[in-house]
Structures are given as C-alpha cells and as structure tokens.
Image: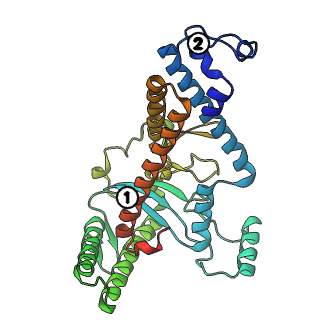
Amino acid sequence: MAALLEGCAWKDSARWFPQSSSDAANGAATTAPFNPFLQFALGISVYMFIIAVQLVGQRILSIWMGHDLNNFVDACSVANVSVIILDEPFHGYYIHGKAPSSRGDWSHTELTKVLHDEDKGIGFSRGLTPDGCQTFEMFLPPNMAVLLPQGGVAHFRQALCRIFAEVRQTQNLIASRRPEKATPSDVAQMSYHRCSVQSLVDSMVHAVMRGAGDVLQVRSSIDWFWGAPPQGGVAAQNHPVFYKDQDGMSWPNGLAWTSSLAYGAELRVAGVGFPTGFEWHLGVLELMLFSIVWRFQGSIFLAAGLAFLLNQLVLKLYAAAGKERLAHTTIINSMFLI
C-alpha cells in the first residue's frame, strides 16, 4: 500500500484536482487537498488490487510448489493419523488420514517405495470413497450411538463430554498443587482419557466406513453455497452425514475444513480462493484502520504501520487463545504446541 500510494504517487489521484505521475514529474503542484470520497475509494481499490495479485500469484505458485494445507492432508495420510474438527456441537470436519497400508512408522526407503507404488495405482485408495476423497464436512445427529471395541454401545456426544469433564478435573487437580506437578497417577489417568477418546472416535469412523452408502453423500451446489444442513436438520437423522469436501486446489480433496482455522473460509473461482472468513474480516479491519488514519492524519506510512501492527496483534491473540484451547481439547500438554 505504502509503496504504490506514496512511492508511485498514486495518492495524488485522490485529490480534488487529480494528477498523474507524469504531472508530478513535470513539476506540477500537488497542494490540492484530498477528496475524502476519492481517498476512501482509492484505498479500497489499491487494497483489492494487492489482494488479487497475491491470490493469483499463490494459485500459480501452488501448481509447482504445492499448498501447505493440501500437504497437511497428505502428511496425515502418510502418518496414518485422522483429524476430526468440531466447530459446533453437531457439526465439524473430518480428514481421513488412514494410510492404505495402516502403518505410520516408515523408514525413508519403505516410505519411498510405498509412495511409488501408490503413484502407479498399486494398493488401496487413501480416501473413504472410490475417487480417493479424504476431506469431509460432517453433521452428527444428537443421539448418535457407536459400537465400542469392547462390545458395548456408547452415546457419542455424552461420552465425549464426560471424558473431557474428567480431563478438566485432572488438570485442575494438577494446577491446585504447589508446586504444580503431575504425579505418575495423573499421567496414567490422562493417558487413559486419551485412549478413551481415540477408541470413541475410531468407533465412529469405522461405523461411517461400514455405512458408507448412506453416510457419504454429495452436496448440491446450491446447498454448498448456503451451507445448508441435511434435509430435515441433524435432529432428524438416524446416522451421521458426511458431505464430500472437494472444493479445493487438489482434487479430490477440498479446503472447506479451513473455515474453522485462522485461514478462514474461501469462495473459489477458477481455482483461485477469495477469502470470506476470518482472514477477510481481519483484512477489512486493517483497511478500516488504514483509511481512518490516512484520512485524519494524512500519513500513508503511519496508516500502513498501524494496520500492520493491528494485524500482528490480532493474530498473536488468536494464536494464543487457540493454543490454550487446543491444549484442553486434544489432551496434550501445551509445551508440545508450536
């Protein structure tokens, strides 16, 4: 923003008597005051231009260099780790990371051979569907029950809430000690809770795989655009519903699951994703601050600097809150979060 508006003298286009860069080079006076309407319109135009260039450049580079979020899905598959993200009580996203070989501990030589065989079409598919889709948007019915490996039946939501309530009790007990220190019993209890959650989630995923014909569905374009739930709502469902998420740069996998992250949701046109979630909201907040400071202080550099500081402040606070939350909802110690 500062380089284009100040360095290229684009700011003079927002004056009551607009001037071009050639006029400035010929020594024409630039003392005319700024038109507040043109000033605001110019700021928005330059900001949108910069965003468009960044998005198109990111899309072009991803063709050769890949995309970090798509690489994360691939890493989940190689590591044999599946991910469930619940952003609402009965709604979330699922990344199917089960490796075709059911192994995640490979040497470099073994991993190279497995990936080579997969590239040749040898072995099983990575995804839950024949086309290899690994990313899904899921809706869970409130009364969903799963069959546990021990043979019993558990209410998924109630069992999950009960486990995390016990986790919080253990964490509060550790925090109440002076000095704060976990005992071997606490470590064993947390390990037991982690295994309980893993068993519960595994049972749910295996139930989805067994009933793939009814559970795995394709959402229409209109329903996808509006984010519509299954017909009748989640309360009317007898089983979970997994919609294939294939709106991304790496078909058959999509990036709708990023709407629950700081990356935010996107509206994808011709392969280029335009932010519509958290990233867009933060960008609009930066633009508002930039426009206000430039309008009333007249300094483009000050406005750009304050907008940058605001961006970093919000991201740091968001990361700190997310790290604190993640430490409680993944049953791991926060020291392992980068």
Q: Residue furthest top?
A: 17
- Of marks 1 and 2, which one's residue comes earlier in the chain? 2
| Residue lying at 30% horizontally and 63% vertically, measured from the top left | 144
Image coordinates of residue 126 in percent, x first then y, are 61, 65
User: For mark 2, does the 10 Å Cα neighbourhood hold few (<14), some (14 to 19), or many (20 or more) residues?
Assistant: few
SS state under label 1: helix
Q: Is residue 198 above or below residue 303?
A: below
| Residue lying at 31% horizontally and 51% vertically, measured from the top left | 234
Image coordinates of residue 107 in percent, x first then y, are 69, 82
User: For mark 1, does the 10 Å Cα neighbourhood hold few (<14), some (14 to 19), or many (20 or more) residues?
Assistant: few
Q: Amino acid at mark 1?
A: Ala
* Quadrant position of the N terminus in the picture: top right
| Residue lying at 32% horizontally and 86% vertically, measured from the top left | 182
Viewer-proximal residue among 224 and 111? 111
Q: Amino acid at mark 2?
A: Thr
Note whether residue 271 is visible.
no
Q: Quadrant of residue 66?
A: bottom right
The residue pinned by badge 2 equals 31
Distance from Cα at disc 1 to Cα at disc 2: 47 Å
Image coordinates of residue 203 in percent, x first then y, are 40, 73
**Is 259 positioned to the left or the right of 153 in the image?**
right
Q: Which mark is residue 219?
A: none
Image coordinates of residue 174 in percent, x first then y, are 27, 81
The residue pinned by badge 1 equals 321
Viewer-proximal residue among 50 and 64? 50
| Residue lying at 44% horizontally and 31% vertically, measured from the top left | 288
Q: Quadrant of residue 103?
A: bottom right
